[in-house]
Amino acid sequence: MTERPKPKPSDERYRVIRNVTLVGAVVNLVLSVVKILLGIVGHSQALVADGIHSLGDLASDFIVLLAAKHANKEADEDHPYGHGRIETLISVGLGFFLIGLAAFIMFDAVSRIIQPERLLHPNAFALGAAVFSIAANEFLFRYTLKAAKKTRSNMLHANAWHHRSDAISSVIALVGIGGAMAGIEFLDSVAAIGVSALIAKVGWDIAWRSLRELVDTALDEEKVNEIRNKILNVDGVKAVHSLRTRSMGGEALVDVHILVKNPKISVSEGHYISENVLYTLINHFEEINDVVVHIDPEDDELHPKSSHLPARQEVLTRLDNYWIKTPLHESVQNITLHYLDGRIHVELELPLSSIAAQTDQAKEIQAAFTQSIETDPDIATIKVKFT
């Protein structure tokens, strides 16, 4: 049997996210102050814009900390699926915040190009700050991305790419500053527009990915196929259909219908197979933390439905009326009902002593019970077992 999954270490996950984000916040605070001050002293609009980008990352760091604290709370009565959607909502807000920030920077840069007298003239202070920013943000990107993979946090992953975008924006600022110092005065403002466009793209990517998650977009096709194949390898599973997946924060949820190989297995065996499917998926896929398995004795997408058929108590009442004049009907020990192909298939047990080990008598008893249900529109077959 597949090993039972271990509890998800939500406290450890929060600790990692918190520590990594605090490091990023400190570095971004230093970078934003350095770039904005040296951008002003060094007369570089691109560097000031880059400093504002770092302030945006600093704001996002605090948002990540807030979201991580709430998103990793255990499920409760009001939130039976946990609090992962808080992380998603925060990511949507962060994405649109970055888009708004980009629009402000772009507007200011364009206005300076239109009014050349407002163009700035960068110096070596701005150039040095841009080089420092590139190195610091590339470090933050690699450090944060490693933690994101460890914790499977989409929010932390997004924050890592904020750092990478800040490094790239610093490269653009570096080019703009260098060009302006070389005599192409408007290049600094052009670089500021480039930085703002990059910020806007990052913001849109974050917002769009999180919005897709909010409307329960499925996992990517490759991952879904991997999940399907893993289920098919579980003993007792014949086929898989109605496989649905969705994301919630850094976790994935799966709903699936599985067709068992033998449609007449016991309820307990069907439950055993479903538990094996659940444990197999949770143990194999780190991101999966919840699986709902529906056991099908037959493919309910192809075979007639059985929902219109009478429930067990009504069926037993009918059978009792049919068997009232049937020999040995009072000796029936157990009745099993199988709802298959839109009809009911009955299995009943009689004591072996009732036929005195005579094959002909057993056939007569079977025939008598079969004849008793011939006029019932819902009951297809009846099988007598001697135990």
Image (cartoon, rainbow, N blue to C red):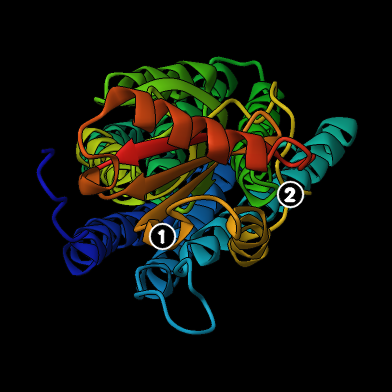
Give, as a three-letter code, the residue at label 2. Answer: Leu
Q: Which residue is mark 1?
A: 33
Q: Secondary structure at mark 2?
A: loop
Characterize the local packing of mark 2: few (<14), some (14-19) or many (20 or more) Cα atoms within 10 angstroms.
some
Which one is nearer the viewer's eye here, 46 or 102? Answer: 102
Q: Which mark is residue 230?
A: none
Residue 43 located left or right of residue 311: left
Q: Looking at the image, which residue is at 45% across and 17% down?
A: 225
Residue 259 located left or right of residue 235: right
What percent of the width, then of the height, locates residue 98?
A: 64, 49
What percent of the width, then of the height, locates residue 230?
A: 31, 22
What percent of the width, then of the height, locates residue 18?
A: 26, 65
Q: Which residue is mark 2?
A: 309
**Circles 2 and 1 in contact, beta carbons < 8 Å:** no
Give, as a three-letter code, the residue at label 1. Answer: Val
Characterize the local packing of mark 1: few (<14), some (14-19) or many (20 or more) Cα atoms within 10 angstroms.
some
Q: Is residue 271 above or below residue 318?
A: above
Residue 19 located left or right of residue 95: left
What percent of the width, then of the height, locates residue 202?
A: 59, 36
